[in-house]
Image (tube, helix red, strand yellow):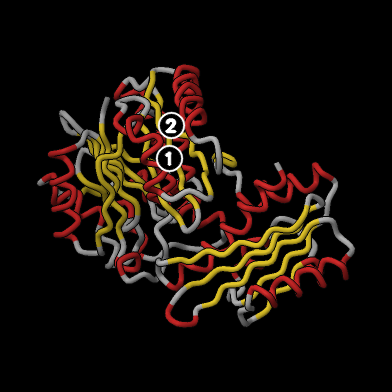
C-alpha cells in the first residue's frame, strides 16, 4: 500500500492570512482510497524550500501531492521547484497554452504574457488540463513515486482530484482498498477515565482506536483499513460494539451528531420544551445552540455570573414565565482565580442542583461549562 505526503504551498498560509482547507480535503480523499498519509507540510513561496520538501518526501513516500503555487505570477514557484527537485528543465507545452487562451476567450478576455508561464511545466511531466480554472496541473513520474501538483483554489483542486488524480492513483498503484473512520462522542467523562476504560483497545493494530479531548467531551476515533468498504464497516461496527459495552454513560452519538442536537431531539421525543438560562458564559451557550432551531425566546444569556441561589430562583422564574416542562441554568464564576460552575436542571421528575470546578484554561472553561450542563440534562432525559 503506497504512502502519501501532502505539501501545501503558499506564504499566505504561513502568515495565517488564509486557512489551509485543502490538506483536510486531500487527507480524507486519500484515506477513502486506502492511502496512508505519512506527513502534511506547509511551505512558503520559495523555490529552494519547496524543492527540498519534495526531495525529502520522495525518500519516504510514493505519492507526493502539492497544492498551490501554479498561478501566473513570479511568486508562483511550484513548477520551477518541482523541476529543480527532479533535476530537469521546464518546457513549454503549446497545448496547455492553447487551453489557457481558450479558457480566457470564453470569458471574452485575452490572457496576459504572465499567463504564458502556466504553460511551462517540468520536462517529461504529464499535463492535466484544468477546465474549471486557468492553472494547468501536472504529474511527474519517477520509478518509485509520482509528484502530483494541483492548483490551490479549492474548487479547482477538488474538481481535478476527483476527476483526474484519484483515477490516476487507482490505476498507477492498483488501489482496491479503503480506510474508513468513525468517531464516537463522549461527554461527562475525562480523557483519562475513557483511557482507563478502553486503554487496551487503543493498541489494537486494525482497526485502530485513538482519543481526542475537547472541553467537556472526548472523541474516540475508530479507523479500519481493508480491501473493501463492507469489511471496513464490519470491523468498525465490531470495535464500536466493544467500546459501547465498556462506556455505558456519556456516549451520546457519533460522527456528525452533536450534543446539543441530541438534547434537542430527546426533548422533542418527550414532547417537552426547554428554558435555557446562561450566566457569565460570554455567549458560549448561544453560540452552541445556534443552528439547532432552538426558539430564541427560550434562551436567556446574562453577562454576569450568579450565585447558586440566584441561579435557582432565576431558572424557576424563567421556566414559569415560558410555561415549559424543562429548564437548564448554567452559571460560570471566574472569581478568586477559579472556574466555578453552578447548574440547575428541572424536569417533570424534579429539580437537581450541581456544582463543579474546572482547572483548565480560561478560554476553554466556557465550552466545558456548556457541554457539562447539556450532558447532565441529556442523562435526565434518557
Q: Please provide percent x and percent y for residue 64.
A: 25, 41
Residue 165 at least partly seen: no
Q: Which disc, if any, is residue 166?
A: none
How many marks on residues?
2
**Looking at this view, is 346 or 42 the one in front?**
346
Are circles 1 and 2 on residues that touch, CB within 8 Å? yes
**Looking at this view, is 199 or 118 the one in front?**
199
The residue at 24%/35% (across/down) is 146
The residue at 37%/26% (across/down) is 207
Q: Please provide percent x and percent y for residue 356.
A: 52, 64
Q: Is residue 65 left or right of residue 234?
A: left
Position of the N terminus, as image quadrant, is top left
Q: Residues within 10 Å of mark 1 (few under 14, many from 20)?
A: some
Label 1, secondary structure: give it.
helix
Q: Is residue 328 left or right of residue 6?
A: right
The residue at 87%/66% (across/down) is 322
Residue that mark 2 sits on: 32
Q: Please provide percent x and percent y for residue 59.
A: 12, 39
Residue that mark 1 sits on: 28
Question: Relative to 88, is 369 above or below?
Answer: below
Position of the C terminus, as image quadrant, is top right
Distance (Cα) linking label 1 and label 2: 6 Å
Q: Is residue 164 left or right of residue 306?
A: left
Q: Please provide percent x and percent y for residue 319.
A: 82, 66
The residue at 65%/46% (across/down) is 379
Q: Is residue 281 left or right of residue 58?
A: right
Amino acid at each position: 500500500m503506497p504512502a502519501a505526503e501532502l505539501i501545501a504551498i503558499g506564504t499566505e498560509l504561513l502568515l495565517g492570512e488564509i486557512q489551509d482547507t485543502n490538506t483536510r480535503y486531500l487527507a480524507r480523499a486519500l484515506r477513502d482510497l486506502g492511502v496512508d498519509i505519512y506527513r502534511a507540510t506547509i511551505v512558503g513561496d520559495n523555490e529552494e524550500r519547496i524543492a527540498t520538501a519534495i526531495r525529502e518526501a520522495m525518500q519516504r513516500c510514493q505519492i507526493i501531492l502539492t497544492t498551490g503555487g501554479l498561478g501566473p505570477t513570479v511568486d508562483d514557484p511550484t513548477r520551477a521547484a518541482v523541476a529543480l527537485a527532479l533535476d530537469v528543465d521546464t518546457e513549454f507545452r503549446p497545448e496547455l497554452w492553447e487551453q489557457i487562451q481558450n479558457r480566457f476567450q470564453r470569458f471574452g478576455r485575452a490572457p496576459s504574457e504572465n499567463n504564458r508561464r502556466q504553460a511551462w511545466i517540468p520536462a517529461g511531466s504529464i499535463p492535466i488540463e484544468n477546465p474549471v480554472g486557468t492553472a494547468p496541473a501536472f504529474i511527474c513520474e519517477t520509478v518509485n513515486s509520482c509528484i502530483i501538483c494541483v492548483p490551490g483554489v479549492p474548487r479547482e483542486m477538488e474538481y481535478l482530484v476527483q476527476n483526474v488524480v484519484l483515477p490516476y492513483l487507482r490505476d498507477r498503484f492498483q488501489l482496491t482498498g479503503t480506510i474508513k473512520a468513525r468517531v464516537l462522542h463522549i461527554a461527562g467523562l475525562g480523557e483519562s477515565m475513557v483511557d482507563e476504560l478502553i486503554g487496551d483497545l487503543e493498541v489494537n493494530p486494525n482497526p485502530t482506536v485513538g482519543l481526542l479531548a475537547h472541553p467537556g467531551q472526548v472523541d474516540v476515533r475508530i479507523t479500519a483499513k481493508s480491501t473493501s468498504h463492507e469489511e471496513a464497516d464490519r470491523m468498525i461496527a465490531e470495535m464500536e460494539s466493544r467500546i459501547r459495552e465498556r462506556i455505558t454513560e456519556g456516549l451520546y452519538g457519533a460522527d456528525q451528531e452533536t450534543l446539543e442536537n441530541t438534547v434537542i431531539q430527546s426533548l422533542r421525543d418527550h414532547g417537552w420544551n426547554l428554558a435555557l438560562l446562561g450566566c457569565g458564559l460570554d455567549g458560549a451557550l448561544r453560540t452552541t445552540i445556534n443552528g439547532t432551531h432552538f426558539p430564541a425566546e427560550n434562551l436567556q444569556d446574562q453577562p454576569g455570573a450568579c450565585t447558586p441561589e440566584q441561579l435557582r430562583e432565576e431558572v424557576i422564574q424563567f421556566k414559569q414565565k415560558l410555561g415549559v416542562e424543562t429548564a437548564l441554568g448554567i452559571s460560570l464564576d471566574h472569581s478568586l482565580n477559579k472556574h466555578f460552575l453552578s447548574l440547575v436542571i428541572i424536569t417533570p421528575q424534579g429539580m437537581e442542583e450541581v456544582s463543579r470546578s474546572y482547572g483548565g484554561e480560561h478560554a476553554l472553561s466556557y465550552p466545558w461549562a456548556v457541554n457539562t450542563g447539556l450532558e447532565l440534562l441529556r442523562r435526565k432525559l434518557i
